């Protein structure tokens, strides 16, 4: 927001790439410090840092989220900067306070970007207790934890002031996912109760007081145990350290084998390079390996063994412990809408840097340490390191989409300055924009929304109504970039009476009320108002395809269409007959269950989206809901022109949760007529509701099709 206010919105779009670049630079310095903590010399540490920096910036999720406006790039920058500064001041120990203050403020500021970053308190708490109980507490630690506490307190004040309900949802949802709420007597309180009752508000202060008392008691106990058993425990550690490290390394390998091979149970080996996997969380590590590569996963596993056996010490354990904790946490459950590549964002701050550091450590070990006692054999080890890195980078070209290969389509290269596909047989040259590197996602969105803003009257209030998530794509930039009064109606049952009162108030001020209806936006009904068509709007932009069970390899287009209506007081109630033109202004009549259509299409599909092929094939019916004006007639006649994607498909008319009519559709467009009892239909406000349910047919492209309709006319039967 600050960046946008200083340099404008268009230049402000470069804020996320700049922050991601700073995060990559912080990773370079952190990797260099980790190498030095593992007793590497200066030149070797710098080369190690260069390798990790390169591996990070060519990894698809890193540069993808460098251009995607979510909080992970900033979280990565703050996290890696904070950990680097912490490692640095623990290494130098010169008594200066600059690095401790930087570390504390950076780690505390994470809570400004991620309200759900509470897991970070666990490693910080362990670090605090280790320094406190071991009597190695210095003034730098006062500076570090003081800066962290100030930033955390300010972030908490912001959260509880501006977003208490969001904060409650984040944590209560996670607790309910793990059934932890069931362990509490009476379960979790509701948000309103939690933030209004004084006893709940006093809980943090009581917990803080209890924590201080527990710390003092525990400190006395620990010092007594140190005095009595400290020397013997240190001696026991020296005797058993080697075998404990071997045991820990074995546990890491076993965990990776379980998470990568046993738990997900892939049906084919192709799953490891982007093929179909299970939809649940068991395949999370496989899906991370789609972008890091199976070679990267193998190298990271070997690097973890090397770190565990050789490198792990008091100087670097905070990074490896914290990053390992977050990696395990998000691999066990992604806590996100699990479509790819979006869900990879939770791996950006720490999981991806950790795995890249470990993979780079494996390559470093091959280059410097493997067979180092024999110069001739060491050459083979270095050749192996170079070869493995080369194969990894070839796979990275595949992950970037610059190379596409399949048995069905052959090999395709995506290169710059190519406008169309050419080639034949097994080899093709395709445009660079077909790759995840080259796709210009949402290209043209700013221009299209700016054009919409220019068409609206200066005093207009615009209310969008469509599917659950679509309207915000236009309303948000209209509001915050172009300073237009844009709103989105509640998806489920918008309060028509309240909206009518708002429309009355705005019109009394001399303002124009515009209703923007999109697909399935017909739930928005304002009693006493008629609709006067004044224009249209669309958002037609490319977006990288998403999938839940396989690696997306291409782009598709978002095509959201709206018709704009001026809300004007109705002179008389709407009446039948009414004709719904599914190739025209059908939006105000569509309640749910209809697919988007191209602006020039003459018909619209009744259907649903389902990326899982097995679920799509198992779906028996799809349904949609339309509305039309009430009538006093006992019966209504419905005429429609429609077709089905296959022969012998049925279209069922439902009212009040039961069938009221049925017709058999053909694969070619035909006209149909059915007569229905008006009393059998549902009512909502001043409208009848009619459900259309059709036999489902999966089209193999992520859609489930029911019936394609050109027009539908409803007439009262007198």
Image: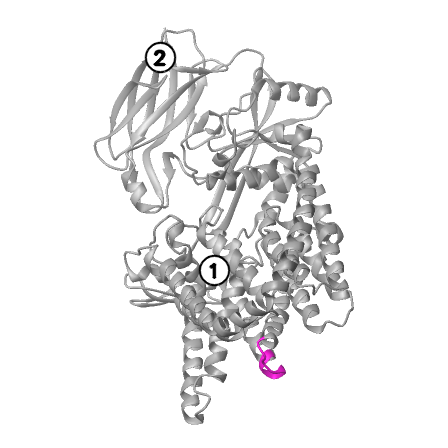
Q: Secondary structure at mark 1?
A: loop
Task: Provide the residue span drawn in magenta.
Answer: 38-45
Q: Residues within 10 Å of mark 2 (few under 14, many from 20)?
A: some
Taking the spot 56% from the left edge, 16% from the top edge, the residue there is 527
Disc 2 target residue:
680
Count of picture labels = 2
Marks 2 and 1: in contact by CB < 8 Å?
no
Residue 240 within the magenta-colored segment of the rendering:
no
Q: Nearer the viewer, residue 207 or 275?
A: 207
From the top left corner, tell me how far across and down residue 266 is, in percent: 31, 56
Residue 420 seen in the figure: no
Q: Which residue is mark 1?
A: 436
Q: Name the residue at 49% across, 62% down.
A: 60
Residue 665 lies, in percent from the top left, at: 25, 29
Residue 231 shown left or right of residue 715 in the figure:
right
Q: Secondary structure at mark 2?
A: helix
705 or 100, which is in the foreground? 100
**Figure quadrant of residue 223:** bottom right
Q: Locate the C terminus by quadrant.
A: top left
């Amino acid at each position: 927001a600050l960046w946008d206010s200083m340099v404008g919105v268009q230049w402000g779009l470069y804020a996320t790439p700049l922050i991601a670049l700073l995060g990559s630079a912080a990773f370079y310095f952190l990797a260099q410090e980790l190498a030095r903590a593992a007793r590497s010399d200066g030149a070797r540490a710098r080369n190690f840092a260069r390798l990790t920096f390169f591996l990070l910036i060519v990894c698809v999720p890193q540069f993808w989220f460098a251009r995607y406006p979510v909080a992970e790039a900033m979280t990565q920058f703050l996290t890696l900067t904070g950990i680097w500064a912490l490692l640095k001041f623990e290494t130098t120990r010169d008594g200066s306070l600059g690095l401790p203050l930087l570390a504390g403020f950076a780690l505390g500021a994470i809570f400004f970007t991620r309200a759900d970053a509470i897991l970070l308190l666990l490693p910080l708490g362990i670090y605090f207790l280790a320094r406190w109980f071991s009597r190695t507490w210095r003034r730098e630690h006062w500076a570090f934890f003081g800066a962290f506490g100030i930033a955390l307190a300010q972030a908490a004040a912001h959260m509880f002031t501006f977003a208490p309900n969001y904060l409650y949802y984040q944590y209560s949802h996670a607790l309910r996912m793990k059934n932890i709420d069931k362990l509490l007597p009476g379960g979790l309180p509701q948000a309103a109760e939690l933030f209004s009752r004084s006893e709940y508000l006093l809980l943090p202060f009581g917990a803080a007081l209890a924590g201080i008392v527990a710390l003092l008691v525990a400190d006395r106990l620990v010092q007594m145990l140190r005095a009595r058993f400290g020397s013997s425990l240190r001696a026991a550690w020296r005797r058993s350290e080697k075998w404990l490290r071997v045991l820990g390394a074995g546990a890491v390998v076993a965990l990776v084998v379980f998470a990568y091979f046993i738990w997900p149970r892939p049906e084919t080996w192709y799953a490891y390079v982007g093929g179909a996997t299970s939809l649940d969380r068991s395949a999370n590590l496989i899906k991370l390996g789609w972008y890091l590569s199976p070679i990267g996963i193998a190298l990271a596993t070997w690097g973890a063994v090397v770190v565990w056996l050789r490198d792990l010490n008091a100087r670097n354990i905070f990074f490896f412990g914290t990053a390992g904790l977050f990696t395990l946490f998000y691999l066990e459950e992604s806590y996100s809408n699990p479509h790819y590549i979006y869900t990879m964002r939770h791996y950006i701050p720490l999981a991806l840097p950790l795995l890249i550091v470990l993979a780079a450590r494996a390559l470093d070990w091959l280059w410097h340490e493997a067979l180092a006692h024999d110069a001739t054999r060491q050459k083979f080890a270095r050749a192996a390191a170079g070869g493995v890195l080369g194969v990894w980078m070839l796979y990275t070209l595949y992950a970037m989409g610059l190379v596409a290969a399949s048995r069905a389509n052959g090999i395709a290269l995506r290169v710059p300055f190519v406008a169309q596909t050419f080639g034949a047989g097994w080899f093709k040259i395709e445009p660079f924009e077909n790759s995840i590197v080259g796709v210009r996602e949402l290209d043209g969105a700013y221009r299209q929304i700016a054009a919409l803003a220019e068409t609206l009257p200066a005093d207009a209030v615009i209310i969008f109504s469509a599917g659950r998530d679509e309207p915000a794509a236009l309303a948000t930039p209209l509001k915050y970039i172009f300073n237009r009064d844009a709103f989105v109606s509640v998806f489920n049952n918008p309060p028509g009476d309240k909206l009518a009162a708002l429309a009355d108030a705005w019109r009394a001020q001399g303002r124009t009320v515009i209703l923007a209806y999109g697909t399935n936006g017909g739930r928005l009904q304002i009693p006493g108002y008629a609709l006067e068509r004044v224009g249209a709007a669309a958002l037609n932009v490319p977006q990288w395809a998403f999938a839940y069970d396989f690696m997306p390899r291409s782009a598709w287009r978002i095509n959201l269409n709206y018709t704009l209506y001026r809300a004007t007081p109705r002179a008389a109630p709407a009446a039948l007959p009414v004709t719904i033109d599914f190739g025209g202004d059908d939006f105000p009549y569509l309640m749910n269950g209809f697919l988007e259509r191209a602006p020039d299409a003459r018909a619209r599909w009744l259907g649903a989206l389902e990326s899982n092929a097995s679920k799509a094939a198992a779906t028996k019916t799809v349904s949609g809901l339309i509305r039309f004006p009430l009538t006093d007639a006992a019966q209504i006649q419905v005429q429609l022109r429609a077709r089905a994607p296959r022969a012998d498909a049925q279209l069922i008319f439902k009212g009040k949760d039961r069938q009221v009519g049925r017709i058999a559709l053909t694969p070619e467009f035909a006209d149909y007529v059915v007569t229905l009892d008006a009393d059998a239909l549902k009512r909502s406000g001043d409208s009848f509701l009619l459900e259309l349910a059709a036999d489902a047919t999966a089209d193999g492209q992520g859609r489930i099709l029911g019936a394609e309709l050109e027009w539908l006319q409803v007439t009262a039967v007198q």
